[in-house]
Image: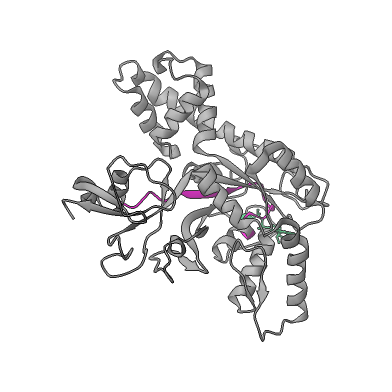
Amino acid sequence: MPPPEKLIGIVGKTNVGKSTLFSAITMVPVKIADHPFTTIEPNIGVGYVRVPCVHVELGLKQCNPRSGFCIRGFRFIPVKLMDVAGLIPGASRGRGLGNKFMDDLRQADVLIHVVDASGGTDLEGNPVKPGTQDPLEEVELIRREIDEWFSSVVKRVWEAKIAKSIQSSPNPLDLVTQNLSGLSIRKHHVIEALRESGLESKPIKNWSASDVELFALKLRQVAKPIVIAANKADHPVAEENVKRLREKYGDDVKPVSGLAEMILKKAAQSGLIDYLPGDPDFRVKPGVELSREQSRALELVKGNVLEKYGSTGVQELLNHAVFRKLGLIVVYPVEDQNKYTDHSGNILPDAYLVPGGTTARELAYMVHTDLGEGFLYAVDARRKERIGESYVLRNGDVVKIVSAKS
Ligand SMILES: Nc1nc2c(ncn2[C@@H]2O[C@H](COP(=O)(O)OP(=O)(O)O)[C@@H](O)[C@H]2O)c(=O)[nH]1
Ligand SMILES: [Mg+2]
């Protein structure tokens, strides 16, 4: 089976720009309005992380992606996104669309927390004068809401399912993992949370209520890591807030303008400009006459966003979530290690996003169960070296698998 698809959840208060950001990333038209609860059904869409494509390094002119695309030597690899219903304070206790929100959240592997860095949205999601709200408070509040929800689910499951069986369980780790799978928890999450909470050496059956509490908190941090999108960075008031957010939360804060990304993508789709997501700039296509409004909008994007922050920030945001927070790497399985093709001659057809630490044999299973079961050896196609089943893949590896069952 191909590597399990990761799901990025876009969360935050109402009116901070989640739907605009989601549309900009996926270019799926969704309702955008100033009213709370406009996004009632979760919107699922596809976005793309951007990496330098290995075809360039291999001296090839091009490649033929089966999914995603490759432009100017950059490979855009699909990831799934969900625009989650707006969160309001108290949601973890069922206020507003609280329960809907929480149900959506269970499925997410990483969260993009969108805050209004211009400070122009109050806690209930009403537009107010920019600069009057503190986005740092917003970060804390939403984080607390997510933590409370998460630990309440863990505690409920613990009391109802885990506590009773743990005394006699031959494998406590599996018992915990299985019972928490509804939160998209995997074994490696549980192991890491045990380590992070310092509870590794204390038998789970002897845990106190506060041990469970601590474990739940660490598990949230491990299994639902959060990246902060300091949105509306195009607004002049946002600059100071972006600085303060970065001082407090470091590299997990990305200044972004979903609106700017939207304007650029639309202009590119209409054939007015050349722009690739993640680029520091755009270029008006030769022979194109821009209308006055078009020029003005693009000038604003340039002056208030690109020149200030180096890009719209949207691509960095996605890449950070996938590569830094989820720790995924890119590997390219091929069937012909000399031509880097599949059996039909497609060059580098697949770019898999796999967890760091994935071995050659695990990759074989992702390509096809038969390849995994009959695994003999693999070939590092770039170096033309044989590699064994326990070889740990590196980012950018091009791998041919040799199997007795292919
Ligand atoms: N200045 C600015 N406004 C934005 C940006 N993104 C969204 N908005 C505006 O913020 C309001 C709420 O946007 P929406 O995407 O519906 O927010 P949601 O409720 O979080 O989904 C709309 O008026 C948008 O035009 C941005 O990057 N910059
Ligand atoms: Mg919305």
Image position, residue 14 (x, y; %): 67, 50
- Image point (45%, 15%), residue name: 207
- Image point (60%, 79%), residue name: 271
Q: Residue furthest left?
A: 404
Position of residue 48 relative to residue 162, above or below, is: below
How many labels sit on residues? 0
- The residue segment tinted magenta is 1-20
- Quarter-of-image position of residue 381: bottom left
Q: Is residue 389 left or right of residue 127?
A: left
Image position, residue 47 (x, y; %): 52, 59
Is 112 included in the stretch rendered in magenta? no
Q: Is residue 344 left or right of residue 244?
A: left
Q: Residue furthest bottom?
A: 287
Q: Is residue 80 left or right of residue 249?
A: left
Q: Nearer the viewer, residue 183 or 347?
A: 347
Q: What is the chief secondary structure element of the magenta stretch?
A: loop
Residue 42: tell me if it is visible: no
